[in-house]
Image (spheres, rainbow, N blue to C red):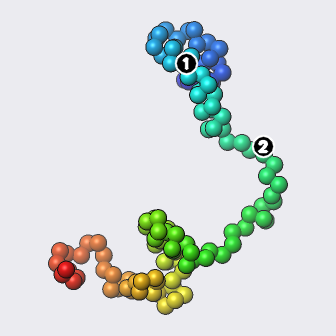
Amino acid sequence: MRRFGSVDELYRRVAEITQPALRQRLETHRDLAYLSRELATVRADLDLGLDIDSLAVAPIRRDELFAFARRWEIRRLEALAGEQGWKALGGRGPGGARSAARRGTAAEPPGAGVAG
């Protein structure tokens, strides 16, 4: 692409490619090259029939978000749901989460906490 600048120009001048194996792969996969270009192109000319005001975000249903995050093991989303949603419940999330002071850190020395 550095040499030709575009997919169209590459295929107009494919005969100039001196490596036979590369030229053959390009010719064999021409359709995939054009499909890839189409899929990677961001369209900015579409009329979606929406205005910016209709795209406002509704309030998050935190219980459902937390359940979704926990079900699919999306830890960051689970933490976000907890940070944003459970404060209103006195800092206790689903399952009776401990306060930040009682949770400790990942840097606790070995043997700290409850032995199993």
Secondary structure under tag 2 reads: loop
Secondary structure under tag 1 reads: helix
Tally of numbered discs: 2
Q: Position of residue 28 (x, y in %)?
A: 55, 18
Q: Nearer the viewer, residue 59 or 66?
A: 66
Reading the image, the residue beneath label 1 is 28
Crowdedness near tag 1: few (<14), some (14–19) or many (≥20) residues, C-alpha within 10 Å: few
Name the amino acid type tagged 2: Asp
Q: What residue is drawn where x is 57% and y is 8%?
A: 15
Reading the image, the residue beneath label 2 is 45
Query: Would you identify the image quadrant in which residue 7 lies?
Result: top right
| Tag nearer the camera, 2 or 1 | 1
Q: Identify the image quadrant of the C terminus.
A: bottom left
> Which of the two labelled residues, at mark 2 and mark 1, occupies the earlier sequence position?
1
Residue 45, can we see it? yes
Give residue 6's mark: none
Q: Position of residue 67 (x, y in %)?
A: 51, 74
Left or right of 33, for residue 94: left
Query: Would you identify the image quadrant in which residue 59 lies?
Result: bottom right
Name the amino acid type tagged 1: Thr
